[in-house]
Image (tube, grey):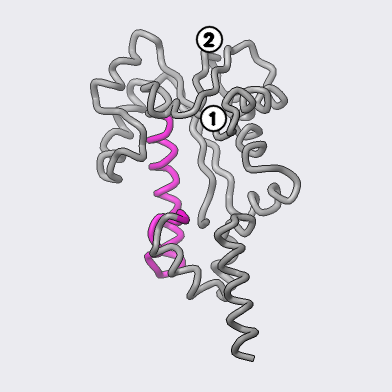
Amino acid sequence: MLGPLVICLATVEKDREQELKRIGVKDSKLLTPKKREHLYGKITEICNELVVMKTTAASLNEEMKKHSLNEIEAMELGKALSLIKKPPEIVHIDSPDTVAGRFCTRIRKYHTGNEQLICEHKADFNYPICSAASIIAKVERDAVIEEIKKELCCNFGSGYSSDDRTIKFLKENMHREEVHKYIRKEWATVERLKQRKLSEFDADE
């Protein structure tokens, strides 16, 4: 609901992938912020390349007038693949599409390399390299969120719709102009909050 979309593409030599598992790499959602930060440096030492793509909330708001979120993520991954200096043979991708393989078709529209793309649900749980990429993306996003909190002088939590602090913050601060550039206005939860605010206003009138 708040802050950027952050995507990471990470590459590693096959014979070093198990090193990621040994240092405790797993799906970023299963790790504490402190543990993710601890692993961040170790991951950068083991991986060959890391490409981090950040899309601001303002850019998402504009793009989502024309494209679905899945399409936007495919565009960003296509760009990321094009930025890799030494293209990998196989790319495991955590698919946001309900039909997992359809996400690979989306990506191919924006990248025409020879890599074998494998799109699966829960890839960030099943493959250490995907887990590593998810940790990097999460740490990078958390860093941006902390900067936004400082600017707005408020701890609004994680920025996710599952976070009660984020919901409470938006309910109370939707009217603030300086907050608007960080709100993902096309999100369903944000739309519901906006509609609720309007109905409350009408009731007061």
Lower sequence index among marks 1 and 2: 2
- Classify mark 2: residues with Cα within 10 Å, few (<14), some (14-19) or many (20+): few
Residue 70 x %, y %: 62, 38
- Classify mark 1: residues with Cα within 10 Å, few (<14), some (14-19) or many (20+): many
**Rendered view: 39 above or below 105:** below
In the rendered image, is residue 182 in sight? no
Residue 171 x %, y %: 50, 72
Drawn side of residue 33 relative to residue 70, left or right: left
Element class at badge 1: loop
How far is the residue under mark 1 from the one under mark 2?
Answer: 18 Å
- The kind of residue tagged 2 is Glu
Q: Is residue 133 magenta?
A: yes
In the rendered image, is residue 16 in sight? yes
- The kind of residue tagged 1 is Ser
Q: Quadrant of the C terminus?
A: bottom right
Q: Is residue 155 magenta?
A: yes
Judging depth in this view, the residue of 50 and 119 nearest the camera is 119
Please tell me which residue is depicted at 40% across the width and 49% down the height of the picture. 143
List the residue tagged with mark 2. 89
Residue 50 x %, y %: 46, 27
Quarter of the view holding residue 163: bottom left
Which label sits in the foreground, 1 or 2?
1
Asked if disc 1 and disc 2 are in contact, CB closer than 8 Å, the reply is no
Residue 197 x %, y %: 58, 76
The single residue placed furthest to the right in the displayed view is: 66
Q: Which disc, if any, is residue 95? A: 1
Please tell me which residue is depicted at 26% across the width and 37% down the height of the picture. 38
Element class at badge 2: loop
Q: Which disc, if any, is residue 173? A: none
Numbered range of the magenta stretch: 132-161
